[in-house]
Structures are given as structure tokens and as C-alpha cells.
Image (cartoon, helix red, strand yellow):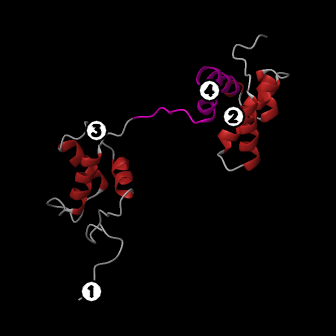
Amino acid sequence: MRIKYQVDLAEAERAQLLGLISKGKHGARTLARARILLKADEGNLTDEGIAEALNVGYATVGRVRQRFVEEGLECALKEGPRPGAKPKLDERQCAHLIAVACSEAPEGHDHWTLRLLANKVVELGFAETYSHEAVRQTLKKTTSSHGKGGCGASPRSAPSM
């Protein structure tokens, strides 16, 4: 089978990859990509052989080869962007949510619950839908607390008088 993306490392690139592997101070995926490129440069193994020798996926070998040929060594070693949903709230809206959580609870409630806060986000028009779990994660990123003990903006307790 003819290899579509032929890896041909320059001597400086080969030395850089060998140095990267010998130091071992990089992430496992980066090191795996470096090993893939070195094996591919040797030219005596197919993609399946490289995948088996390095215990990586066949598609991974092909992607690393392609990125090296099309974008260069640095891009082949780096992590590509990962798909995922954009956050529903921006920083200003998150700050507003935290402020609401620190405010007085609505009438008929002792304190803000995650579900009440999620409903408040929708009521304010920040998002069409918002889950109580998303509220929990937003509050967890701060030192705030939606409980009775104040807003918890500071990890230290208030000074006693």
C-alpha cells in the first residue's frame, strides 16, 4: 500500500524529537506523536505496524503523518482543538449569577437552590435553558456559596469584633 503522507525528517527535526523523548517532560500524547514521526521516518513500517508497535490507533498514525506533511513539525506535535459546546454564559453573566446567588433568597425560600438559580438565568434572558448542574459548576469555579452563610466571596471568615 502506498503511503499518502510520507514523513521525511530533517536531521535537526530528528534530533529535536529524540531530545523531546529522552527528556520525558512532555505530555504522553506529545511523546506518542514524536515516536510516531520517528518510526514513520524510518520507513520500514506501515501505519498498521507503527500503530501496533507504539500501541496507538491506526487513525492516529495517519493524522500525525498528515499534520506533519501539511503543517510542519510543531503542529504535528501539538494538541488540535477539540470540539465542544460554547459556554452559554459569558463572564459578565456568570458574575451576575454569582451576585444573585449571594443576594437574599426569593420570597417563600430560605436560600437559593441550584434549580432556583437555573430558573433565574432563564428568567433574566441569559439563556433559553440552563441546568442546575451548570449553575453548580459555575459556582464551584468561585469561592462563592449559595447557602445561608453569606456570599462566601472570601475564603477567610469575617473578622470578629
Q: Is residue 75 magenta?
A: yes
Q: In which quarter of the image is the N terminus?
A: top right
Classify mark 4: helix, strand or loop: loop
What's the distance in space between the residues labelled 2 and 4, CA to CA?
13 Å
- The secondary structure that dominates the magenta segment is helix
Image location (x, y in percent) of residue 31: 70, 41
Label total for image:
4
The reply to whether discs 3 and 2 touch (Cβ–Cβ < 8 Å) is no
In this rendering, the label closer to the viewer, 3 or 2: 2
Residue span colored magenta: 61-85
Q: Mark 1 points at which residue?
A: 160
Where residue 49 appears, x then y in whole percent? Answer: 82, 25
Res 115 visible: yes
Q: Which amino acid does label 2 sit on?
A: Arg
**Is 58 situated above or below 146?**
above
Ranked by sequence position, the earlier of labels 3 and 2 is: 2
Report the front residue among 67 and 90. 67
Locate residue 134 relative to residue 26 in the image: left or right.
Answer: left
Which element is circle 1 on? loop
Q: Name the residue carrying label 2.
A: 33
* Pair 2/1: label in front: 2
Task: Looking at the image, tell me whether mark 2 or mark 1 is earlier in sequence order.
Answer: 2
The amino acid sitting under disc 3 is Thr
Q: Quadrant of the C terminus?
A: bottom left
Distance from disc 4 to disc 1, alpha carbons, whole Å, reads 61 Å
Toward the left, the furthest residue is 107
> Which residue does the numbered mark 4 point to in the structure image?
72
Q: Residue at x 28, y 38 (%)?
A: 129
> Per the image, is 83 magenta?
yes
Pointer 2 or 4: first along the chain: 2
* Mark sitting earlier along the chain (4/3): 4
Q: Name the residue beneath numbered marker 3.
A: 129
